[in-house]
Image: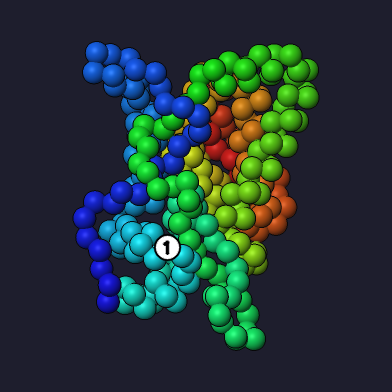
Amino acid sequence: MTRRTGTTTGPVPASGGEEHPADGPAGLPDALDAAEFAAAVSAVTSAFGDPTRRDIYLWLRDQGGAATATDAAAAFGLHPNVARHHLDKLAAGGYLVAETGRAPGARSAGRPSKRYRVCEHDRRLTFPPRRDHLLGMLLARAIEELAPARAEALAEEVGVEYGLVLAGRIAGRDGRRSARAAVAAVADVLTAHGFAAHTEPRGRSLAIVSEHCPFGDAAQRYPHVVCALDRGLIRGLMLGLHGDTNPRFEASRPDGDARCVARV
């Protein structure tokens, strides 16, 4: 059984763009506030809080190629379903990409297996999440130039498209998941992107509860646009993982609620 110990050097999900400009004599980046720090920690621990999951990530990174859940199970003495859970959790965080296909040189006529590989861009640690203030200023000006209805529609379209991309990285062409499994995966993805999300039962359905909004001041300045983007992101993820759905927000931080709650 292969085991790796020690602190992971895996990446921390980044929101894109450049890091904060230097803010002090030591050249340190701007400090995160308490909510941002908690969200960043949630993103890291969701992916790497389990030591076995850290070991699997490091092992897969060292492979230099792709591996199946069966490969990981054999290497770590796990049940394949347990290994698959760890791999899917890493894929939901954006650290792995799932692809469906046969191993190079394989001659089997059976069903192609789901294989996981490390994202090429996820090989260095970035903490805290990176931002780009200039790009934010540009987007803010663009939003102000659009009619409100068009800005919201555009935001939701972009959210759906990006959600589909993220769903493809998680599921490959492995088929659809149950609604409960898909919602859990969506919460993992949102957590990796700074939302500190989890699922809660609501009667016969499930809700995705986000404790933090990674869009900061933009969510207060353009609440309807940002919420449309979130709604589209959830919809795109669910579409790619389960099937078409129409998430609706029952609570929203920009509207003064303590948490964002999306009923799926």
Q: Quadrant of residue 251?
A: top right
Residue closer to the observer: 223 or 140? 140
Q: Residue furthest front?
A: 105
Q: Residue furthest left?
A: 6
Q: Identify residue for label 1.
A: 64
Decide: is 150 above or below 95. Answer: above
Residue closer to the observer: 172 or 156? 172
Side of 150 relative to 82 (left or right): right
Q: Residue at x 62, y 17 (%)?
A: 138
Decide: is 221 above or below 16. Answer: above
Q: Quadrant of residue 255?
A: top right
Decide: is 117 above or below 259. Answer: below
Colour setup of the view:
rainbow
Residue 198 visible in the current orientation: no
Count neighbours of disc 1 (C-alpha within 10 A) and say few if under 14, some if 14 to 19, many if 20 or more. Answer: few
Q: Residue at x 34, y 17 (%)?
A: 22
Q: Position of residue 49 (x, y in %)?
A: 31, 52
Q: Position of residue 62 (x, y in %)?
A: 36, 62
Give the structural element (helix, strand or loop) at label 1: loop
Q: Residue at x 52, y 26 (%)?
A: 215
Amino acid on which disc 1 is placed: Gly
Q: Residue at x 42, y 75 (%)?
A: 71
Side of 233 relative to 64 (left or right): right
Q: Quadrant of residue 75?
A: bottom left
Decide: is 139 above or below 241. Answer: above
Q: Position of residue 196 (x, y in %)?
A: 43, 39
Specify the quadrant that holds the N terminus: bottom left
Residue 155 visible in the current orientation: yes
Q: Position of residue 108 (x, y in %)?
A: 60, 86
- Total residue callouts: 1
